[in-house]
Image (cartoon, helix red, strand yellow):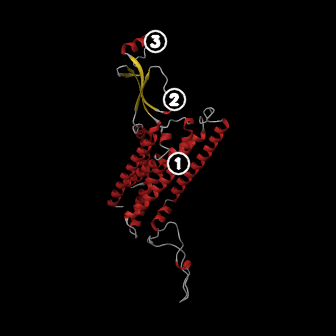
Amino acid sequence: MSTTTLTEKPGRPRKPRKPGKPGKPSELTPGRRLLRGLPWLVVRQHRIALACVLGLTVLTALWILYERHELVQLLDAKGWPEKDPGRPMEDDRGYEYITSIINGLPLILAVFVGAPLIAGDQESGTAQLVTTQSVTRRQWLIAKLGLAYTLALVSGLVVSALFTWWWKPHRSLFLSEWIDGVIFDNTGPVLPAFLLFLTAAGITIGALARRVLPAMVGAFLFTAVTTLFVWDEVRVRLGSPEMFTSPMGTELPARFHDVYEVDRWVGSADGTLYNWGRCAEATEKATDACIKEHGIVNDVIEYIGYNQMAGMQWLAAGILLAGTALLTAFTLWWTSRRPL
């Protein structure tokens, strides 16, 4: 690897000019680039990962545009919303493939962008070489983090905006509930924040591991546990559950069509609540006797309404961004004080 300092700006050699004759601007200045110095070096170093993630983002965006166009055409032909269109999203392979790609983006960014970002330079010795040139360790770290976070943010914003544009006007036709991860985590501000957080987690794991392979394995395990187990528990706790009581056996109002039901009970006139199966006896006569004995007259449900979705998403994004900030601060502190 060349030991040329990073402040040098590569370009075409200057042509000699005759004494007394002013040179043209094109002869006196090197070729211009959008990025120069350290940012240009970092982009060039990670150009394969950059191209892959951006290519996947563009592919997903175009696919969403196509699927939405096909859905709109189908609904117009069936006279929706005046007429029932049936279940147009059932067995929709395009929707399944798109959501699989979007759900895989956090893993891709954490494992293939975040984990090797610093660990790769530490393992190969590039970090030591770069910081002996005309840039400081902090400048090197900021350039690295800036590239990874910009990539995660751009990818998340584009995909989330288009997926929201596809889902929101037609949400009653989608089979997944609004609180399911495939919808909640991929619309609004949650997806960009999620990508930033898991990218930051991959970078932190890489800085601690200092080797690419262990870093990628650690990032994979962390992302899998977070997305499959931890976040599912966090998501449903972001809302404020409400209670609704109705006479036993009556239908719920139409506004409860898209609520998320947290739990369900039966209750007596004095407000005492019993488990839904409290009077589930073997015979109807025994069931009626149990209901009469406990004075059960009401059905009670605990629910989170769709009207809370926006607030829950911004709360989720705030938590994820706070986690990103903490991980970034720790990575800067740890890497700035540890030998490269």
User: Tag 1 or tag 3, which sits nearer the N-term?
Assistant: 1
Q: Reply above or below: 298 against 336.
A: above
Give the CA separation, mark 3 to mark 2.
29 Å
Q: Kindly identify which numbered label has been placed on residue 284.
A: 3
Give the CA separation, mark 3 to mark 1.
52 Å
Residue 214 visible, this angle:
no
Residue type (three-letter) at the residue carrying disc 2 = Ala
Residue 181 visible, this angle:
yes
Q: Position of residue 32 (x, y in %)?
A: 53, 71
Q: Which residue is mark 2?
A: 254
Residue located farthest toward the left when viewing the structure as drawn: 337
User: Tag 2 or tag 1, which sits nearer the N-term?
Assistant: 1
Frontmost residue, 1 versus 89: 89
Q: Which residue is mark 1?
A: 161
Q: Which of the 4 image quadrants contains residue 94?
A: top right
Residue shown at 41% from the left, 38% from the top: 239
